[in-house]
Amino acid sequence: MNVPRPSDLDCADVPKPTPASSVHGRWRSMAFPVIAGSVLWANAALGAGTQLVQIIPIPGAPLASYDISWVDPTRHHYYLADRSNAGVDIFDTRTNEFVGRVGGFVGFTGSNDTSGPDGLVGDGDRLYAGNGDSTLKVIDVDSMQIINSVSTGGAKRVDEWHWTRPASDCSSSTTPTRPHS
């Protein structure tokens, strides 16, 4: 699937984004850095000499469901597909602080096939995140706002991104709506 830059898309039918500043709820904690994205790997990592350096508090529900994360070494940001809070969490890797959350995703629905956000990939000032409703969300990193939503025509999640440079071709996979025969 080729995904054009947001400026090339007709945004007339895209709903207004939810402000990233509308983060409410209790503060919870998440161990950082996330090495493999899974607590199951923690013992092996600690056994290999890795140690917990800091715990970063994040707002909202406890982190129980999440998907792929992305590190942007140029912007010094870590992005986490946080299904528990229906958004992409943003952390500053220099200060180890929670920066904010981009909402507007379906969150955890009880099924991996329809939950979101899912796979993440970045390109400069844009972050692309799959969602459980078979849409691709285009996020402006500077404003922390969803600036476009592209439907893939399916009913389940968009996931597993691959971004190719310099052609800027983007491909992803979706969970099939029905089993293949």
Image (spheres, grey):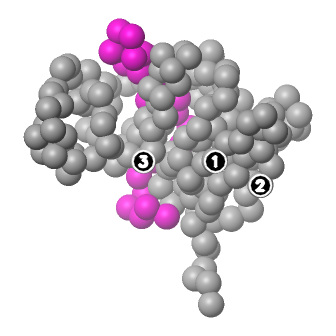
Residue on which the image places disc 1:
162
Q: Nearer the viewer, residue 115 or 2?
A: 2
Residue on which the image places disc 3:
67
Neighbor class of circle 3 (other Cα within 10 Å; few <14, some 14-19, many 20+) is: some
Hey, which quadrant is residue 25 in on the image?
top left
Magenta stretch in the rendered image: 89-113
Say which quadrant the C terminus sits in.
bottom right
Neighbor class of circle 1 (other Cα within 10 Å; few <14, some 14-19, many 20+) is: few
**x%, y% of residue 1?**
77, 55
Q: Nearer the viewer, mark 2 or mark 1?
A: 1
Hey, which quadrant is residue 152 in on the image?
bottom right
Spatial CA distance of label 3 from label 2 is 21 Å
Residue that appears at 62% across and 60% down: 173
Amino acid under disc 3: Asp
Residue that appears at 25% across and 30% down: 30
Residue 5 horizontal side relative to residue 171, left or right: right
Q: Residue furthest front?
A: 48
Q: Is residue 33 magenta?
A: no
Q: Is residue 107 magenta?
A: yes
Spatial CA distance of label 1 from label 3 is 15 Å
| Among the two numbered marks 3 and 2 on one chain, the one whose residue lies closer to the N terminus | 2
Q: Nearer the viewer, residue 160 or 90?
A: 160
Spatial CA distance of label 2 from label 1 is 10 Å
Local secondary structure at mark 1: strand
| Among the two numbered marks 1 and 3 on one chain, the one whose residue lies closer to the N terminus | 3
Residue on which the image places disc 2:
1
Residue that appears at 54% across and 15% down: 75
**x%, y% of residue 67?**
42, 47
